[in-house]
Amino acid sequence: MHDAMFSPLRRILVHDDFDTGLNGWCPLTPNLSGDAFEYFESQKRYKLWGGPMLSNASFQFLGTHGSMTGLYCMKLATRPISGDPTLQPVPGSMAHALKRMSVANPGLVKFEMWYTYKPEQDRPGIGESDVRAFGLFCDIQDDAYRYFWGARYLNAAGGKMVRKWQYFRAAEGTDEDWGDMGQSAVGEADSKTKTYLSRGIDSQWLGKRFADGTADGFTDVPGGAQALCYNETADKINWQYFSMTFDLTRRQYVEMQSVDKRFDLRGCSPTLVSAFPRIRQLFNPVVFIETDANRRAFLFVDSIVISMDDAK
């Protein structure tokens, strides 16, 4: 691991350089409802989300970028379809990659990555406003709660630039207006109970959305406006650094860094919901991207480091 690229905590949990493959990062797929291999009705629309692939970041005019430190990066690609910003994402308009893990020692956890983003170079114009949002979150469950912590960069909505960071915390409201309230998983093995999604789970596509691109699954990072390096033509990319530190013991955010800006998030918390069956000690990091136009949007990730330390 290049010392200049990352600043991890004391214990390295994951170091994924995609020159060596996808390293366990896989598509985010819906839950199967039973032996018939059918999806739960409420989740069928999620089977069209794009999954990860290895890429050398090729573009029509430039050719091959490669990754920041080698040949390959992990690439996420949406389909060329988007919906109105006031609606939940339409099938195919997002892409996700996750790593299915569990964590044994609660404490501080830090996620770091080098990434870049761009729409497909399939038409004239730089396409800066054709990417709606991208980000990182972790799906966590401990002995008491399930919750999502992470960050979303809201780049544009309805073709208008926004350029601000948000963190995963749902606004006040009911489960019923969160959306997709059908059964999401089987219940406990020794009962006939069923499992349903709760407000604050799957914020990346659930909850109310608004014309300016905001949604009630996210809260603005204080001082989180930031213009990222996009470059001047549609075939040029620039790798950028991102990190987020979270306290699993206190269930609170600590800090986020995006390129040269640090954001103090102490005192900020995610939305906690009751624990779900069978996923105790769940630790699933996810990266995602959403398009804002009928044009494929790409997220390229050079490498990822996840590290841990004892809570201070």
Image: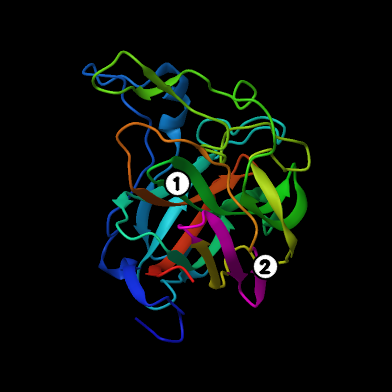
Q: Is residue 61 visible?
A: no
Say few, some or many: other residues with alpha carbon within 10 Å of mark 1 (under 14 / 14 to 19 / 20 or more): many
> Whole-percent x and y of residue 258?
61, 70
Q: Tag 1: residue type? A: His
**Residue 13 visible (yes or no):** yes
Above or below for 68 versus 279: below
Q: Amino acid at mark 2?
A: Leu
Q: Residues within 10 Å of mark 2 (few under 14, many from 20)?
A: some
| Element type where label 2 sits in the image | loop
Q: Nearer the viewer, residue 298 or 148?
A: 148
The picture places residue 175, in percent across and down from the top left corner, at 59, 25
Total number of numbered labels? Answer: 2
Marks 1 and 2 sit apart, C-alpha to C-alpha, by 21 Å
Residue that carries the numbered disc 1 in the rendered image: 96
Q: Is residue 268 above or below residue 183?
A: below
Q: Which residues are magenta?
A: 247-265
In this view of the protein, which residue sits in the foreground, 103 or 162? 103
